Amino acid sequence: MDPMDTTPVSASPNAWLELSVAVDQEAAESVSELLAQYGYQGGVAMEATPRPDARGDEPGMPYPLERDPTYPVTLRTYLPLDAHVEEQRQRIEQALWHLGQMRPIGTLQTQIIAEQDWAHSWKQFYSVQRIGTRTLVVPSWLTHTPAPDEVVLHLDPGMAFGTGLHPTTQLCITLLERYTSAGMRVLDLGTGSAILAIAAAKYGVGAVLALDNDTLAIQAAHANIEHNGVQAQVQAALGSLGAGVGLRHWQGGNVPSDQLVQPHETRMPPPYDLVVANIVADILIVLAPDLADALAPDGVLITSGIIQQRSDEVAIALAAVGLHLREYHSAGEWVALVHGRRAERRGGQAC
Amino acid sequence: MAKKLVAVVKIQLMAGKATPAPPVGPALGQHGINIMGFVKEYNEKTAAQAGSVVPAEVTIYSDRSFVLRLLTPPAADLLRKAAGASRGSPTPSRGNPVGTITKKQVQEIAQVKLADMNTTDLDMAVRTISGTARSMGIVVVDE
């Protein structure tokens, strides 16, 4: 691309200049170092397309290209398309020229990409997802005629977490299928796309409060709740629970604490028959006392977003606030826990 | 049936700070993997290393599933710290060194990086690290 071509679109706040260069693997570290100095947030991506004989059928197995340092890789970094982009591009080009005097370095390639390019590119690979025993996640660009016992969640995977593809979402939905019952009052903490809140509503609970401390997530949650026609049952709000008001969102967002509502300030205050919190271990540990306080005497707490090696810490934190571990489930590296105020469900069985 | 490998993408990011913005979105989105799934897993696994650059290797399979593996710090980072240099030389080919490092230090860095290089040949790793040092304008000295 002629760098002069960048000028007409440089005013767009949602466009980027992708810079890529092919190098051999021995040069990759030094070129990465260079690109990281200029790239957005120091981010650099390196990609090599496997040779046809690459196997790679076991997670973690050695990657064949690693053993061939002469095989080229492509390094990419990204610059926001603003008034400084051409100056930065020239600096990178000059620095690459110097490195090229010492070892072979490919020509710097550039292309303009729009934000929606990656926000939507993966949709083409998305299909109807079956989760649990009777739940289907159907994106808007696909059609599905459900069987009488199937519950369909209409959800477009977007920037908010909770597309139905992640193991933690699947674990939570599988548990919600079993633990929800008609008329329940439910809190979905860290709702993301609201997938769990919508699922609970469609399983027949009475009301769901869906909170998240990320503005984009709540925007997505509102849209998804309306799209699924469960507005009467689900209330979504920018908010958090107890100590969570002082915590940042796990993706780095930082909504001022005075803009976050607490459950008792909503039209659906505690206690709750069921609380589901698919967040991360660190936050669940901090929130343990608040989660326990929010539960009704017979209430059930489902926690997930926990990587396996940290599940003990979460279980210990929840035990310390008087909750009993009823179930432990894992999918790959991820874990979901079910706790109750009592060791057993009233009229039910412990596991 | 074994899942077929489609691509391996290494992404260099600040620990705990991954977002769908570049480079994550464009680099991974083109392969059809769940970007937010990656972001959550990366941030969760790197939360304890805040403030450091932690590269991740994302192995992508034909069913759009992926495996994320954290890598050792970039060799350039380790070399800069060992040489006491704040950054690499912008003009290494003109002999403008930014620092020096001993062969023993190079060997120590190579030992650290060996796990990611999928070789047990320390000599080869030392040669690669020495090459990276030269490219950054860091001179390797005997003592």
Image (cartoon, helix red, strand yellow):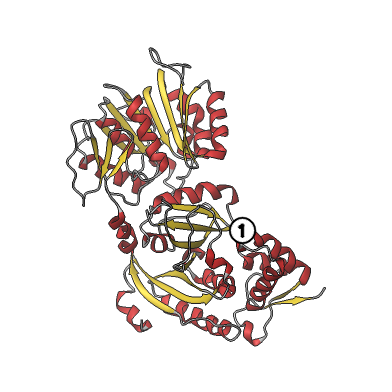
Quadrant position of residue B140: bottom right
- Residue, far right: B143
Q: Is residue A89 above or below residue A270?
A: below
- Residue A263 placed where, x, y %? 37, 30
Q: Find numbered disc 1 in the image and state the secondary structure of the residue it sits on.
A: loop
- Residue A202 placed where, x, y %? 25, 32
- Residue A72 placed where, x, y %? 51, 75
B82 or A246, which lies in front?
Answer: B82
Dot 1 falls on which chain?
Answer: B
Q: Which residue is mark 1?
A: B72
Q: Amino acid at mark 1?
A: Thr
- Does residue A260 appear in this view? no
Name the quarter where the N terminus of chain A is drawn. Answer: bottom left
A112 or A334, which lies in front?
Answer: A334
- Does residue A107 appear in this view? yes
Q: Residues within 10 Å of mark 1 (few under 14, many from 20)?
A: some
B75 or A218, which lies in front?
Answer: B75
Q: Count how many numbered circles sit on residues in the image.
A: 1
Q: Residue at x 39, y 15 (%)?
A: A348
- Judge left or right: residue B114 versus residue B44: right
- Residue, far top: A347
Q: Residue at x 38, y 82 (%)?
A: A3
Quadrant position of residue B80: bottom right
Q: Is residue A347 above or below residue A252?
A: above
Q: Residue at x 39, y 34 (%)?
A: A172
Quadrant position of residue B7: bottom left
- Judge left or right: residue A1 versus residue B106: left
- Judge left or right: residue A56 versus residue A273: right
- Residue A126 placed where, x, y %? 30, 52
